[in-house]
Image (cartoon, rainbow, N blue to C red):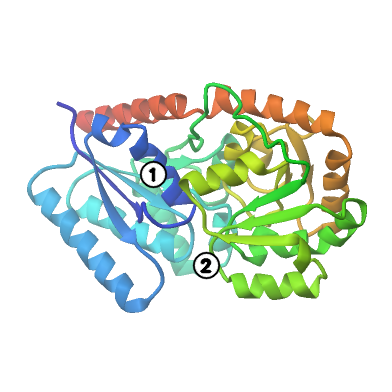
Amino acid sequence: MRPHIIMVGDSISGPGGISAVVKTYRDTGFFSERNIIYLSNYEGAGGMRQIRVMNRAILAFLFLRLKQRASLVHIHSASRGSFWRAAMFGELARITGVPFALHIHSGEFPAFFDGCNRFAKALVRRTFRQARGVICLTPGWKKKLLSQIDPQAAMTSLPNPVAVPNEIPLQNTESKLRLLFLGRLTEKKGLFDLFQAMPRVLARFPDLQLVVAGDGDIEMAREYATQSGIAHAVVFKGWVDGEKKERCLKEAALFVLPSHFEGFPVSILEAMTYGKPVVATCVGGVPEVFVDGIHGHLVPPHDPDALAEALLKLLADPELMARFGIAGYGHARDNFSTHLVMMNLGSYYDSLLSTANRA
């Protein structure tokens, strides 16, 4: 029987990138295959709620260690508060004598680290160095974090997985063109840049519809859309998952994500598995997810004009959109499928456990 592994991260039922990745792990059967026990250390904002969630997770962790039911701990982390929660469980793992792997998901992590004071930076470096392994989402992020934080950290790169259908799902046959944005409704995701770009796009394609799906401050986003003069063309779906997300992807003509920061956006991969061309910003790990001019277009962040130009170029050329979509599907299937990524993660676990046993 395989050894038990404790995995720690955001609630599987919540929104966000970590939740989506962990849910994919679970749904592929990886939890049962590797005897993974999942502990949620975050279930939404609120001071009292967070105290309850952390206390429950810490007690569960200590109980499992007391029963000797863990040989490895896999801790998921974004930045800021998410990292400090992860660091706390890393320290618990160290104290109780079990190796841990730290999995960094946030594209804002370098900016977060730069904003830390000397003491906080020392704690970040200490956590990285004490980890048996640090998982980065792309080779580029691995190189950046090694140079910025700790060149001695045991880092590896592992992409996020995405479920890839056996063939490109049937596409929307309606005449109405739809753009799809999937992500948190914040300035950092570039949503307001997209709103600024839309008047120019709508001038050429007045019947175009922008579908905005994600959690966050919808009322603020509605107000910004109104101020931009595009409220009539924007549909807010809120946070979507399951069949609702599938419907959004199937009905979209193309996918757009003009983020200011990104680690490894699963939403881009999801769009590619549905045969959708992508327009995104050249930030973080995005250039390592798809190739500009092959699977879609990359534009600079904070540049609504460049964003509008890229959208117009694709919308005016359905054959190019179809070609990008087919190429993107094949790229996602061959490099980021759940089978491939989970196999590599399982091998990584085995290498960490082997190293721990020898130590």
Quadrant where the C terminus is found in the figure: top left
CA–CA distance between discs 1 and 2? 31 Å
Q: Quadrant of residue 238?
A: bottom right
Q: Residue at x 75, y 54 (%)?
A: 209
Q: Assess disc 2: are there few (<14), some (14-19) or many (≥20) residues with their C-alpha within 10 Å of its C-alpha.
A: some
Residue 303, visible in the rendered structure: yes
What secondary structure is marked by label 1? helix
Q: Residue at x 32, y 27 (%)?
A: 351
The residue that label 1 is drawn on is 23
The one nearer the camera, 76 or 141, is 76
Q: Say whether residue 90 is left or right of residue 263.
A: left
Pinpoint residue 286: horizontal percent, then vertical percent: 65, 42
Q: Residue at x 57, y 39 (%)?
A: 270
The residue that label 2 is drawn on is 116
Q: Say whether residue 65 is left or right of residue 138.
A: left
Mark closest to the chain's N terminus, 1 or 2: 1
The one nearer the camera, 187 or 126, is 187
Q: Assess disc 1: are there few (<14), some (14-19) or many (≥20) residues with their C-alpha within 10 Å of its C-alpha.
A: some
Pinpoint residue 176: horizontal percent, then vertical percent: 77, 46
